[in-house]
Image: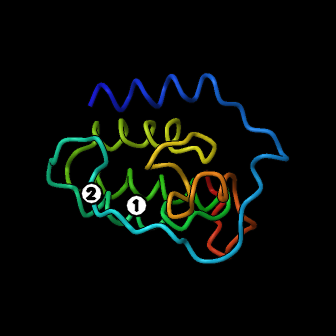
Amino acid sequence: MLKCRTLVFITSLFIAPTSSLFAASPGEPSLPYPDDGCSCFPETGFEDCCRAHDKIYYRGGSEADRAKADRELRQCIRGKGHTLMGDILYYSVRVGGVPWVPTPWRWGFGYPYLSQRGYAAGTGTDNTND
């Protein structure tokens, strides 16, 4: 688990997004969907929350879509009685799930890293009540 956090932190420090490099690609995700529960996190009884969150991250979308998915993850985990873990995972995905970091859990991870980097236009599921 420490290895995953270290990778996310170090990578996010050295990779900065630029508008020309991070345009989203249209079309369906081409990479296989890995069903790994809560990526790099111990199995603790709220894997269904992580799986639902991962399915949204796999496809990507707008920045507002990502914020909504992250809030829903936190609420789902809290709803299972894990308030602190809900907050920890929420902030972890807010920092580590950005689309420009080349990790297997980034926003839009269903697309190859070099073809899908960034946020797509709104999908109609945006919720701006952050």
Q: Earlier along the polypeptide chain: callout 1 or callout 2? A: 2
Write the residue at 25% across / 41% down.
41
Kind of residue at disc 2: Asp
Across and down, in percent, residue 11 comes to 54, 28
Write the residue at 28% across / 51% down.
38
* Residue on which disc 2 sits: 36
Q: Quadrant of residue 4?
A: top left
Q: What crowding class fits label 2: few (fewer than 14 Cα within 10 Å), some (14-19), or many (20 or more)?
A: few
**Nearer-the-camera pick, 15 or 98:** 15
User: Which mark is on residue 54?
Assistant: 1
* 19 lies above or below 123: above
**Nearer-the-camera pick, 80 or 58:** 58
Element at label 2: loop
Across and down, in percent, residue 3 comes to 32, 27
Q: What crowding class fits label 1: few (fewer than 14 Cα within 10 Å), some (14-19), or many (20 or more)?
A: many
Element at label 1: helix
- Horizontal arrangement in the rendering, residue 67 relative to residue 3 (left or right): right
* 7 lies above or below 30: above
- Horizontal arrangement in the rendering, residue 98 relative to residue 75 (left or right): right
- Horizontal arrangement in the rendering, residue 1 relative to residue 14 (left or right): left
The single residue placed furthest to the right in the displayed view is 20
